[in-house]
Image (cartoon, rainbow, N blue to C red):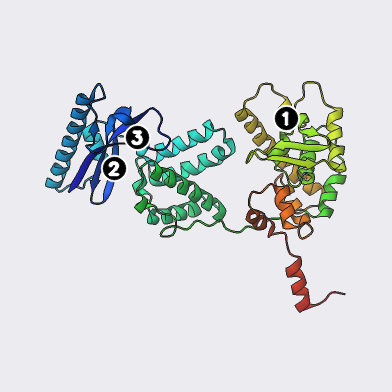
C-alpha cells in the first residue's frame, strides 16, 4: 500500500521560497517529486499538509496538490491490478508528463564534469572526463544509479583491467570517482542509502601502495652539471626540474607558473595550485643562480619566470592550465633525453623531482618538518608519501643480521 502526501522541502539554507513536493512511500521505498510551484515557508501548514489561506492562490494550489495525489494513487492501484512493478520513474513520467533526464547516470556524471569546469578545477576535470567515459560506456546510455550495484562494480573492475589494461591505481581512481558520484546522487535523491554499493557493507576502495623512485644526489649533480644551450626548451626543462627539487619538491605546475612578483626578500611566496595553500620557501643559492639567468633575459612585459606563459596576454585560468599541461609534456620528453645523455637509467619526469626531494631527505629531516615543506594538512599524508624513501632503520636491521660491513 502506498502513502502519498504533500510537503515542502525545507533546509537550513532555505532563503525566500521553497518548493512544494509530493512524497510517495511504497514498500519502505520513498520518492519526492517537485510539482513545479514554490511558496514562502510561512504560507505552508505542515500539520494539514496544505497551503494556508494567507497565500493568494491557496485554493488553486491545494486543488493542484490533491489532483496530483489522486492521479498518483489511481496509477499505483492500476499498476498493482495489472501485476506491474511500481516504478517511481514511470509515475513521474505518466503523472507529470516528463522524465528527469538528469536521473540517468551519464547525464548526472556530465553535470558533475560541468561543475568542475565552473569551479575552475581544470586538472580534476581533465582526468575525470576519460574516467566518466569509460564508466558510462560500461553501464550504458540509459542506465540509472539503480544499476550501480556491488556486482556491477566487480564487473566494471574486470573490464577496466582486461579491456583498457589499466593499472590497479588507475582502476581505484575510477572507483573513487564512481563513489563520489554515488554520494552526490544520494544527496540529490537519485540513489537510496540502502542501495549504496560502497563502504562497510559494500565495495572497499583502498589506494594501493606504489613504489616511488627518486634521483639521488649524484644523479641530481649529473643534471646540474650538464651544459645546455641557454634559453632553449631543453634548458628550460632542466631548470624547471631543478627548481622543483630546490623548492622542496614543488609541483611542476606551480614552478611553471612562478611570477616575478612571487619572489620577495629572497623567498618564493606563492599560492599552490592544487589546494590554494600559501607557500613560502627560501630561495637557496642554486635556485637563485637559475632565476638570475632568466632575469637577465627578462623583458618589461614578462610576468612569469618561464617563457611559455609569457607568449600570450590576458589569459583565463583554463588557457593557463592548458599551456602548463602542454609544457609539462614537452619538458618530460626533454628530461628523458637528458637522462639518457648523462647516463641516468631511471625514468626522469618533472614529477620525479618531487620524489627526488623525498628520496634525498629520507631519514635526514624530521617528519614534522617534511609535513611543513610538503604543505600537507595531515601528517599521515606525509608519512604515507615518505615511507618509500625511509630505509635507514630497516637497512641497519638487515645489516645486524646479515653482517658484511667492514
* Mark 2 lies on residue: 31
* Mark 3 lies on residue: 101
> How far, Cα to Cα, is label 3 from label 2?
16 Å
Residue 187 visible at all = yes
Disc 3 packing (10 Å; few <14; some 14–19; many ≥20): few
Q: Element type at marker 3?
A: helix
Q: Position of residue 188 (x, y in %)?
A: 38, 40
Query: What's the residue at 81%, 22% (across, down)?
Result: 299
Which of the two discs, 3 and 2, sits closer to the camera?
2
Which of the two discs, 3 and 1, sits closer to the camera?
3
Disc 1 packing (10 Å; few <14; some 14–19; many ≥20): some
Circle nearer the N terminus (3, 2): 2
* Mark 1 lies on residue: 308
Which of the two discs, 2 and 1, sits closer to the camera?
2
Q: Quadrant of the C terminus?
A: bottom right
Query: What's the residue at 82%, 26% (across, down)?
Result: 298
Amino acid at each position: 500500500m502506498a502513502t502519498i502526501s504533500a510537503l515542502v522541502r525545507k533546509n537550513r539554507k532555505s532563503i525566500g521560497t521553497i518548493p512544494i513536493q509530493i512524497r510517495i512511500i511504497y514498500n519502505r521505498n520513498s520518492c519526492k517529486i517537485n510539482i513545479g510551484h514554490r511558496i514562502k515557508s510561512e504560507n505552508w501548514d505542515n500539520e494539514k499538509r496544505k497551503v494556508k489561506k494567507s497565500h493568494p492562490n491557496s485554493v488553486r494550489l491545494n486543488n493542484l496538490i490533491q489532483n496530483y495525489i489522486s492521479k498518483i494513487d489511481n496509477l499505483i492501484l492500476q499498476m498493482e491490478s495489472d501485476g506491474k512493478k511500481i516504478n517511481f520513474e514511470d509515475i513521474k513520467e505518466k503523472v507529470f508528463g516528463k522524465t528527469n533526464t538528469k536521473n540517468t547516470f551519464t547525464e548526472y556524471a556530465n553535470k558533475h564534469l560541468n561543475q568542475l569546469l565552473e569551479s575552475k578545477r581544470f586538472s580534476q576535470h581533465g582526468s575525470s572526463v576519460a574516467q566518466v567515459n569509460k564508466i558510462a560506456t560500461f553501464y550504458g546510455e540509459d542506465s540509472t544509479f539503480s544499476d550501480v550495484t556491488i556486482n556491477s562494480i566487480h564487473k566494471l573492475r574486470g573490464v577496466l583491467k582486461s579491456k583498457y589494461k589499466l593499472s590497479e591505481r588507475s582502476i581505484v581512481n575510477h572507483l573513487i570517482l564512481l563513489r563520489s558520484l554515488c554520494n552526490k546522487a544520494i544527496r540529490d535523491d537519485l540513489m537510496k542509502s540502502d542501495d549504496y554499493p560502497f563502504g562497510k557493507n559494500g565495495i572497499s576502495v583502498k589506494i594501493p601502495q606504489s613504489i616511488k623512485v627518486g634521483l639521488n644526489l649524484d644523479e641530481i649533480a649529473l643534471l646540474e652539471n650538464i651544459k645546455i644551450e641557454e634559453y632553449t626548451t631543453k634548458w628550460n626543462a632542466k631548470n624547471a626540474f631543478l627548481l622543483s627539487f630546490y623548492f622542496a619538491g614543488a609541483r611542476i605546475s606551480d614552478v611553471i607558473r612562478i611570477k616575478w612578483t612571487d619572489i620577495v626578500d629572497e623567498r618564493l611566496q606563492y599560492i599552490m595550485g592544487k589546494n590554494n595553500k600559501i607557500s613560502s620557501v627560501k630561495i637557496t643559492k642554486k635556485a637563485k643562480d637559475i632565476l638570475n639567468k632568466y632575469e637577465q633575459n627578462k623583458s618589461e612585459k614578462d610576468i612569469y619566470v618561464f617563457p611559455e606563459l609569457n607568449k600570450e596576454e590576458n589569459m583565463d585560468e583554463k588557457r593557463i592550465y592548458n599551456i602548463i599541461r602542454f609544457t609539462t609534456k614537452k619538458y618530460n620528453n626533454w628530461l628523458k633525453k637528458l637522462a639518457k645523455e648523462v647516463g641516468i637509467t631511471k625514468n626522469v619526469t618533472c614529477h620525479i623531482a618531487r620524489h627526488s626531494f623525498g628520496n634525498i631527505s629520507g631519514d635526514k629531516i624530521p617528519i614534522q618538518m617534511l609535513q611543513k615543506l610538503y604543505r600537507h594538512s595531515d601528517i599521515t599524508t606525509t608519512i604515507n608519501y615518505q615511507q618509500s624513501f625511509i630505509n635507514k632503520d630497516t637497512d641497519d636491521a638487515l645489516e645486524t643480521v646479515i653482517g658484511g660491513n667492514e
